[in-house]
Image (cartoon, grey):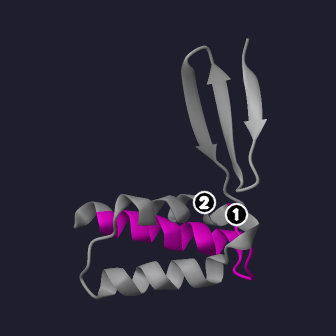
């Protein structure tokens, strides 16, 4: 039988027999899309390639806090992804 263990450090573990899966929980409202997007755009303009772990927040900016309009976020995210693919 599967059971769930809650930890204080915002991660959860699922136990199923001998296997244990650790799941990290991210609260996207703690991040600000108005800071994340320009930071990544600046790095790309400098000619540096974005790492995989830096691209994940790009996909999740629609869930983040910020004053930028959703349509603008999506457009800028698409441009960041297109440029990273071309590099």
What main secondary structure does the magenta stretch of the protein show?
helix
Q: Which residues are magenta?
A: 63-84
Quarter in which the N terminus is drawn: top right
Viewer-side residue, 9 vs 85: 9
Quickly name the residue at label 2. Answer: 60
Indicate left or right for 37 with 79 as reference: right
Quarter in which the C terminus is drawn: bottom left
Provide residue 67's location: percent of width, then percent of height: 75, 82
Image-quadrant location for residue 48: bottom left
Provide residue 25's location: percent of width, then percent of height: 67, 51
Viewer-side residue, 4 vs 37: 4
Q: Residues within 10 Å of mark 2 (few under 14, many from 20)?
A: some
| Mark 1 and mark 2: Cα distance apart in space | 8 Å
Provide residue 74's location: percent of width, then percent of height: 58, 66
Image-quadrant location for residue 82: bottom left
Please determine whether, in this image, residue 21 is positioned above or below residue 3.
below
Indicate left or right for 87 with 37 as reference: left
Q: Secondary structure at mark 1?
A: helix
Pick whichever of labels 1 and 2 is earlier in the sequence. 1
How many numbered markers are drawn? 2
Q: Secondary structure at mark 2?
A: helix
Please determine whether, in this image, residue 73 is positioned above or below residue 42.
above
- Residue at (41, 70) in percent of width and height: 80
Q: Which one is in front in this view, the residue at disc 1 or the one at disc 2?
A: 1
- Residue at (61, 72) in percent of width and height: 73
Quickly name the residue at label 1. Answer: 28
Assess whether mark 2 and mark 1 are in contact (beta carbons under 8 angstroms): yes
Provide residue 15's location: percent of width, then percent of height: 65, 24
| Residue 21, magenta (yes or no) | no
- Residue at (53, 78) in percent of width and height: 37
Q: Residues within 10 Å of mark 1 (few under 14, many from 20)?
A: some
């Amino acid at each position: 039988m599967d059971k769930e263990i809650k930890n204080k450090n915002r991660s959860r573990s699922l136990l199923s027999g001998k296997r244990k899966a650790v799941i990290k929980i991210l609260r996207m409202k703690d991040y600000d899309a108005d800071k994340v997007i320009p930071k990544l755009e600046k790095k790309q303009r400098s000619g540096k390639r974005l790492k995989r772990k830096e691209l994940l927040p790009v996909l999740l900016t629609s869930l983040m806090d910020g004053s930028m309009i959703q349509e603008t976020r999506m457009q800028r995210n698409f441009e960041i992804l297109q440029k990273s693919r071309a590099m």
